[in-house]
Amino acid sequence: MLSLHQNKKISSPVITTLLVGLLSTLAFGVTPAQRGLEIAIEVDNRDNGFNDNTSTLEMVLGNKYGESTTRKMRTKTLEQNDDGDKSQIIFDNPRDVKGTSFLSFTHKKGSDDQWLYLPGLKRVKRISSSNKSGPFMGSEFAFEDISSQEVEKYTYRYLKDEKLDGRDTYVIERDPVDPKSGYTKQNVWIDKERYIALKIDFYDRKSSLLKTLTIGEYNQYLDKFWRANKWEMVNHQTGKTTLLSYSNWNFRTGLKDKNFTKNSLKRSR
Amino acid sequence: MKRIFFAFAVLLAGVYSFANELTGYVGFEGRGFFNKPLHKNQKNNSLSTSIKLEFFHDFEDDNERIVATLFGRKDSVGEERNHIDISELYWWKGYEDFELYVGMRKVFWGVAETSHLVDVINSSDGVENIDGEDKLGQPMVSLLFEKDWGTVELFALTGFRESTYLGSKDRLRSGLVINDNFTTYESSQKEKHIDFAGRYTHVIGDVDLGLIYFKGTNREPSYNKISVGNEDVLSPYYNQVEILGTDVQLTSGDFLWKFEGTHTNSKNSADYFSQVGGFEYTFVGIGDTSGDLGVFMEYQYDDRDDAVGQNDLAVGMRYVLNDTQSTEFLGAITQDLDNKTKFISIEGSRRLTDTWSIESELRVFSTVSSEDALYDLRDDDYLQIVFKRYF
């Protein structure tokens, strides 16, 4: 979770599309849809094999009057071989939600599985994942913005090459497959050299520009996996902002499936 | 003793307020009742302070943990709501194939919103609230096995803790005061009877399935009217029961379908079946806002005519604003389908600052029939506001 370039094996329809794309490319040249998908798959492939990671994050919510509030969380993610990631978020601040914890199984196809642990009642609740367009913790990030980004969750279109802050990027459009998404499309600027997202424009259901996410301070781990420490979301329609700052990245910490169950959720602190 | 506890608690809270392993809150509660007290001796309104302290410590590479949770309340009425409870005081250890818990714990089972039938392990902290969600810690030794085919928990409940009951001056009590000096048990071992329980849970796609088994001292007493001096009081009677039950939730798109059912049998009274079931549907992002509106309906049935949910329909709404302050409202009306008694509950909560929050609840007992289990509470409509300072 909480990363735009999470891996996973590519399902066979994708491979078929790719092959068909490849063949037609030889015959007729690449279509923008094929080019877009190829880029998305390359982004995905380059993040394959991280196994698991943990991090802490701070979320600063700001409104247009310059007031801000802070949230603190810890996250754990476990890569799955043939499906979306499993992940958990444990809340540390504000204090009234301390100990609350959120478990999510992302699926390539169909809706994700989500549970919430409420420490006051010692209760684990299975919750509906169809509110993906809703705000995460009152922030400018929607649930769908922070959940594991599977290739299959969008259709793609290559738009153009562009320089962004001195870096060569591909600009691709991706359209959410799920009708419950709060977006009609997203434009993503992808670093040509490292295959990581640097900027995303989100368009709302009326196709007007809603938010812009700028992703920076990338570091490379295990000589392969890029993770960004600064994620800044600006809502153009409300003037509100959310800054996500990650720290304490750890990879291959030995997390297993049994660390991502309803039982382990109850024990998380 | 209580004063020492509070002084100690406040001191600890102060000293450790930045330590991650000690958390909790201090709550300041006001309860205002709209009608004069119905029963003799009852006080009108109340102010009270509560404190919850939760400590945990992990060791042995996080394979062992100790947890201690204390709860206490000091109430202006000066009756039974003044109390202290050790909610949790246990040691946990994770082995290769199983997990072991030893000590006092709270365990929640179930899926429904308006009734908690399969939640049978802990006794009620009956002086806290009438919603049955406040529980006393239960001493136990339990084992947990997580397998591909489900999670199994086995419990030996080493000693029974009697519910707390409201006193003569407290509101929201039964007409006759419950006197725990006259508690009786079916078992000759009384509160020392060791109870056993089992729990099976499994997630199968969109379905969260649970089964429960319980054998031992009933957490729900029955009451006998007895005379003490020249006053009638209720004496609690705890029989021995065997409970089999299930809780199931199907999560399908914006719908949550929920069911809980239990079958209870005992030696000296008739078997009975209890159930609660229904759905919750959420409208995401209503009216172009980021708020979610959930509507739910639950039907409660119980074979026993004098049970609270013997043939009742609960209809409610949950409005979550998804704003920075996590503002939420939950409203429900429970209608008895036989005698027209209505119970209305509206709860609201909002974060004020990083450490302060406000919670309120309004409860109204309307057109209460003399046949209904809520008859003694018919004049106890109240509004409660709690400010909580978390640390």
Image (tube, helix red, strand yellow):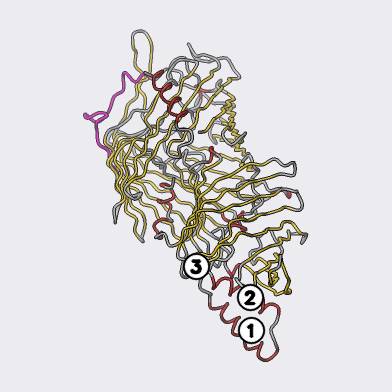
- In the structure shown, which secondary structural element does the residue marked by tag 2 occupy? helix
A75 sits to left or right of B182: right
- Look at label 2 and name its amino acid: Leu
Q: Is residue B162 left or right of residue A53?
A: left
Which disc is residue B19 wearing?
none
The part of the image, by quadrant, that contains residue A70 is top right
Q: Chain of mark 2?
A: A
Q: In terms of depth relative to the viewer, which is nearer, A24 or B233? A: A24
Magenta residues (range): B179-196
Q: Which mark is residue A21?
A: 1
Please name the residue that numbered disc 2 is placed on.
A37
Report the Cα–Cα distance between label 1 and label 3: 24 Å
Q: Going by the picture, which residue comes out furthest to the bottom?
A: A27
- Where does the image place residue B260, in percent across and percent down from the top left? 45, 46
Q: Earlier in the sequence, mark 2 or mark 3?
A: 2
Residue A83 badge: 3
User: In this orientation, which residue lies closer to the viewer: A252 or B146?
Assistant: A252
Identify the residue at image location x=49%, y=31%.
B25
Q: Is residue B127 left or right of residue A239?
A: left
Looking at the rendered structure, whether the residues under marks 2 and 3 are on a common chain is answered as yes
Q: Position of residue A90 (x, y in %)?
A: 50, 48
Rendered view: B68 above or below A107? above
Q: Amino acid at mark 1?
A: Gly
Q: Nearer the viewer, residue B94 or A261?
A: B94
Q: Chain for mark 1? A: A
Please say whether residue B66 is one of the residues in the magenta stretch.
no
Looking at the rendered structure, the kind of residue marked 3 is: Asp
What x and y, as percent, mark residue B322? 64, 45
User: Would you place residue A104 above or below residue B159 in this image?
Assistant: below
